[in-house]
Image (spheres, rainbow, N blue to C red):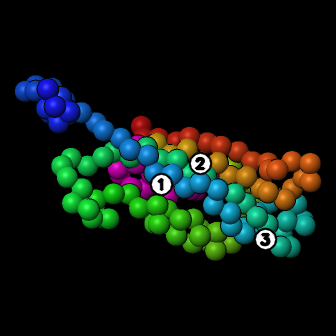
Amino acid sequence: MSRSQAETPQPGEAPVRRLYRILVRDLVLKCSIGIHAHELLAPQRVRINVDMSVLEQAGPLSDDIANVVSYEDVIDGIKAMLAEGHINLVETLAEKIAELCLADDRVETARIRVEKLDVYAEAASVGIEIERGRR
């Protein structure tokens, strides 16, 4: 039996849900973030990682960007978010990025990692990672 035959639901069966992942790795941007007085004075570098599980569309992709979740849209959305102004907590930034990702109904889950890169000389970074999904 071919793969496509195996994935075609039989009468009365639910369709097979196929997922793929969208990755944004080690996106480093300047960001006005933090609760300390010195963090209000100048932007600092943050590293952002995004890992989304995305529901694959039924049928052929037709080699058309409209048929997939675009990592370009995610990156542009993050840049626009950072341009809006100061954010106190890395947790807040991570939640906002997760909301951005989940705004597309095809995204099932979003795992977001936000790290400040220049806080401690002894550490490569400090930060958090969250995972959010549809209910």
Residue corresponding to mark 1: 101
The residue at the far front in this view is 2
| Identity, as a three-letter code, of the amino acid under mark 3 | Pro
Instruction: Give the mark nearer the N terminus: 2 vs 3.
Output: 3
Is 97 on the left-hand or right-hand side of 108? right
Residue corresponding to mark 2: 112
The residue at the far left in this view is 11
| Identity, as a three-letter code, of the amino acid under mark 2 | Ile
Is 92 in the magenta? no
Q: Is the Cβ of the residue at disc 1 closer than 8 Å to that at disc 2? A: yes
Instruction: Give the mark nearer the N terminus: 3 vs 1.
Output: 3
Please state, as top left, top right, bottom left or bottom right, where the C terminus lies in the image: top left
Above-or-below relation of 60 to 42: above
Separation of marks 3 and 1 at Cα, in angstroms: 24 Å
- Point out residue 38 in the picture as x, y percentages from the top left corner: 90, 67
Name the main secondary structure of what is drawn in magenta: helix
Which residue does the image show at 52% across and 47% down from the upper left? 51
- Point out residue 69 in the picture as x, y percentages from the top left corner: 38, 57
Is 106 in the magenta? yes
Please state, as top left, top right, bottom left or bottom right, where the N terminus lies in the image: top left
Residue 43's disc number: 3
- Point out residue 37 in the picture as x, y percentages from the top left corner: 90, 65
Is 40 on the left-hand or right-hand side of 76? right
State which region is magenta. Answer: 93-108
Above-or-below relation of 17 to 81: above
Above-or-below relation of 100 to 127: below
Residue 39 occupies quadrant: bottom right
Residue 61 makes an appearance in the image: yes
Which residue does the image show at 73% across and 52% down from the upper left? 115
